[in-house]
Image (cartoon, helix red, strand yellow):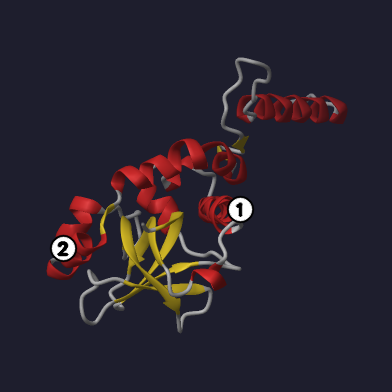
Amino acid sequence: MKHNKVPRAAIVALVIVIIVVAMALTTKYQPTGPGAPTQSVSGQGLDPQTWAQQNYDSKVVPAINTKAQPWGQLITAIQANEDAAGKQYGAIEQGSNFYAFATTITGTLATSTYFGELAIQSPDTPTGVTVGFQVGPAVTGSALRDASGLLDFGMFINQTAYQQAADALNNMVKTEVLASFDSASAVGKSYTITGAFSWDGSGHVTITPVSITAAS
């Protein structure tokens, strides 16, 4: 029996067609113009930098302010029952061991043994706990991202982009809050700080601030 050979050119053409069709089916088109979405998309998820810039002032800061619990009440609840306090006042990301909380604290600022922080001396702080807030130059952690409750891993293409979202929000803190704050001249004075922190059980709390206001 004689077998007909398929020409090599026909095979190549077929492969090219299959590739083009596959690309068309898997490519996500982002519309432009007045009706386009306000969130930039990278691959299959939000672009971290764009999301932070578009939503820090309008969504993240209001969320932290709304969720912020008075420091004395919050730390007392955490010490009494960390898990119950976390479920009532905090948020925890899938795979994380630590709850993130939003709080407001008033106290006298002091130098801290922790690099990049100022200590907050508040009468509401229980024995065995110390508290401070980040003043830079580096602002680290994911407390602001997590405590806001606005983002989750599934909104981003991968873990790297999800972490970049936390970093982008921290960078917004540097420009929107800390750039105009003189940490050296603030020592010894009373301030009210609102922000977010992750409770790791160490006894030291580091707040990432969204507002720093001189107390009257």
Q: Position of residue 1 (x, y in %)?
A: 74, 25
> Which residue lies under the disc numbered 2?
77
Residue 139: quadrant of the picture: bottom right
> Which residue lies under the disc numbered 1?
175
Can the viewer see residue 6?
no
Residue 9 vs 108, above or below: the answer is above
Amino acid beneath label 1: Thr
Q: Position of residue 194 (x, y in %)?
A: 38, 55
State left or right for residue 149 relative to residue 12.
left
Amino acid beneath label 2: Ala
Q: Tell which of 144 and 23 is nearer to you.
A: 144
Q: Position of residue 8 (x, y in %)?
A: 85, 31
Q: Are marks 1 and 2 in contact (CB under 8 Å)?
A: no
Q: What residue appears at the point 30 percent right and 51 percent down from the top-left corner? A: 68
Residue 106 vs 110, above or below: the answer is above
Residue 194 vs 26, above or below: the answer is below
